[in-house]
Amino acid sequence: MNRREFLLSSATAAGALGMGGYGVAASHVKELILQPASFALRGGQITNGMVSLSPDAPPPVLYGQQGKVMRLPVRNTLPDYTAMHWHGLRIPNAMDGVPYLTQMPMGENELFTYEFTPPDAGTYWYHPHCMTMEQMAHGLTGVMVIAEPENPGFDSEQVINLRDFRLDDDGSFLPAFTQRGAARSGTFGNVHTVNWLQNPTYDHAAGGLVRLRVVNTDTTRTYKLHLSASDARIIAWDGHPIEGEVPLPAQETPLMVGPGQRVDIAVAMPTDEGQTFDLIVKLPGQPHRAMVRLRAIGQSQARNLRELRPLPTNPVAKPDLANAELHEFVFGWTPEGGIPDNGFCGTLGYNFWSINRKPWPGDAAQDVGPLATLKMGKTYVLRLRNESPNTHPIHLHGLAFKPIRSNQRKLPPLMTDTMLLLKDEVVEIALVADNPGDWAFHCHVIEHQKTGLTGFIRVI
């Protein structure tokens, strides 16, 4: 699709204000065309060499509905191979978009049609899982919204896609990664954007109720966030409604959102036209700064957060902890060297990281077995041990899990697909193995993933 087709179809998307009107309903998708793009990421400087679904705009918000079929034909016009992963969706394994594990990579001018019925409502996202570092670092990360059958009562919503880009002074791309960064916390960007814009302002009805869908699609950065609005509450985490109460982030206690994670926040807009509130981030060595501003316009709607209906629970099976089987996973540096075999999907050229002290040999490596084999319908507890001084957002494809305990902190009651492991932290998560297939299991700091910190779990 081109930019005009996206804009025309956005009128049918639930919440056209989501990215300034830049979204598309899945029912209107003819083809999603991966293509080179250019965009003014910083000031008036045009950055070439970007990757998107449009030649001059960010990847659109894709809108679907819980329980309704989504058909997404993806055509690759890039000279590199690719495959598209739908992060957080519990869909059939063949549609998961992991090269060599669930499908072969798509070459130039090849088409692969993804078709699935999302069982869960919530906020998700999409990105390539082949040539992952280069294509994501150059822009190919988009948000996916799966709407509930009934509107919980919001007047509008705002998608906030958090992304860093690593640019030179002239606006051109710097190398997407460095060897030093890959061996540590990752290589951070220096241009901080929301929906590819720096410090944008979005208008919403004064006194209205807005659903903020905050998504971290960065390759590296964990964002420490808080709101300047007080009339707000967290309603969902990684797509799934919150059980109980999760404290609203404040400057003293910011919310840590790692790569791949999402948080939905219900906010009551200020009642007077022109009043604003900010989503604020604390970056290392820098003062607090606003990433995005929401501004009240028009006559006050005089809404109250108490008017919102509770989000309906997604149909995720509850773990039976009394009959759970334990598996342990250790995340840390690798004791071995070697260059991973990534076939057509790119390699950074070295291994630094491992799971259970063995680095992933590569996407195309032969005779690689699963990290664990789980039986359908059975409950498991996975003990995740971080033996490194770096944080690791550990993502499990195809399944949802519940964090149950940590050796460092109290964990809020939630369902998730991505667990942010802190330095030296040990976390136990519980899940029901109810989706058959080989499911990727990896760190979502992409430099860590591509240098050994990945594998897969088999459900039979």
Image: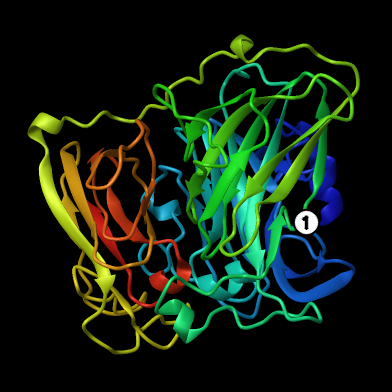
Is any part of residue 223 visible from this angle?
yes
- Residue 163 position within the rendered picture, expressed as x and y whole percent measured from the top left: 64, 59
Residue type, mark 1 in image? Leu
Q: Position of residue 213 (x, y in %)?
A: 61, 38
Q: Residues within 10 Å of mark 1 (few under 14, many from 20)?
A: many
Query: Which residue was labeled with disc 1?
Result: 197
Q: Residue at image x 29%, y 52%?
A: 437
Query: In the image, is 6 to the left or to the right of 456?
Result: right
Query: Nearest the camera: 139 or 203?
Result: 203
- Is residue 365 positioned above or below 70 on the image? below
In the displayed structure, would residue 298 be above or below residue 407?
above
Residue at image position (53%, 39%) is 263
Residue under the point 38% across and 87% down: 350
Residue 150, image x and y in percent? 60, 18
Q: Nearer the viewer, residue 22 or 167?
A: 167
Q: In this rendering, would 419 be left or right of 26?
A: left
Along the viewing direction, whichever of 390 and 44 lies nearer the viewer:
390
